[in-house]
Image (spheres, helix red, strand yellow):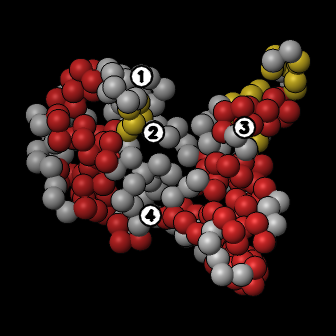
Amino acid sequence: MKKDWFLEASPENLSNGYVYHKEKETYVCLFCHESFQDGVIYPVGDVLLEAKRAIRQHIIDAHGSVFDYLIRLDKKDSGLSEIQRELLTYFYEGVSDQEIAKKMDAKSTSTIRNHRFKLREKERQAKVFLAIMSLLKKKREDEPDDFVIFHKGAKMVDERYATTNKEKEKILSTYFKEGLDGRLSIFPSKEKRKLIVLQHMISRFESDKMYSEQEVNEKIKEMYDDFATIRRYFIEYGFMDRNKDGSRYWVKK
């Protein structure tokens, strides 16, 4: 699976919606991994754009805007409640406090102003937290985080399921007794182990390929007989997605 640029992006890169890969001289979209080679001119509509402008236009065309994409993230990714997301959307659109109060059935505009204050307070707290984490990383720069990273689309994943790479190796050796390229001996019932096993199984699929349901079933059967259960968990846990009629499946990034 491709490296998840989104998880490693700085706040500045997140607000841009893309990251620049210096080694490959490529701009990469954080939301879908679409890439644009620096120095190449891209036809976009009726105009020709250099790579940096092309990726900005791509984000607008494919994702609406950086704000639209980020505001739709699950609470586990953004930390925002449904009300906060709604308020921030109105603020972004320039809706007045009076109009927002009407739309949200608030008692008065003072309620909206209070929400504004709390959001600014949340912003200040986030800055302090980022500074603390930055200092922590500098202090431990010789001791990199050893936790397993799940892609941003993964569901049902929170701090309860934090797993070190050492734990991951132990879990996989327990359930893949024939080796990591072998078959799954039994599907675990505990959530933490289930996530690790599913992550390993999905890694055997090609990240840029569209699969039919039959192809997904056959691929799973190479690893485990109960393909229906694994296929269902791939969807439920956000490792795989499908279209409405179930005719096409793909690995989520």
Residue topped by disc 2: 252
Horizontal side of residue 9 vs 199, given as left or right: right
Q: Residue at x 71, y 81 (%)?
A: 108
Q: Which residue is drawn at 66% across and 33% down?
A: 62
Could you give the CA–CA distance between mark 1 and mark 4, rounded to whole angstroms? 30 Å
Q: Give the answer, above or below, for where 54 lies relative to 8.
A: above
Query: Which of labels 3 and 2 is toward the front?
Result: 3
Residue topped by disc 3: 59
Work out whether mark 4 precedes mark 3 in sequence or the reverse, and give the earlier one. Answer: 3
Residue topped by disc 1: 210
Q: Give the answer, above or below, for where 161 lies relative to 212.
A: below
Badge number at residue 147: 4
Q: What residue type is labelled 3?
A: Ile
Q: Which amino acid does label 4 sit on?
A: Phe
Work out whether mark 1 precedes mark 4 in sequence or the reverse, and give the earlier one. Answer: 4
Asked whether residue 142 is in view, the answer is: no
Q: Residues within 10 Å of mark 3 (few under 14, many from 20)?
A: many
Mark 4 touches mark 3? (CB < 8 Å) = no
Could you give the CA–CA distance between mark 3 and mark 2, rounded to whole angstroms? 18 Å
| Residue 104 image-quadrant placement | bottom right
Work out whether mark 3 precedes mark 1 in sequence or the reverse, and give the earlier one. Answer: 3
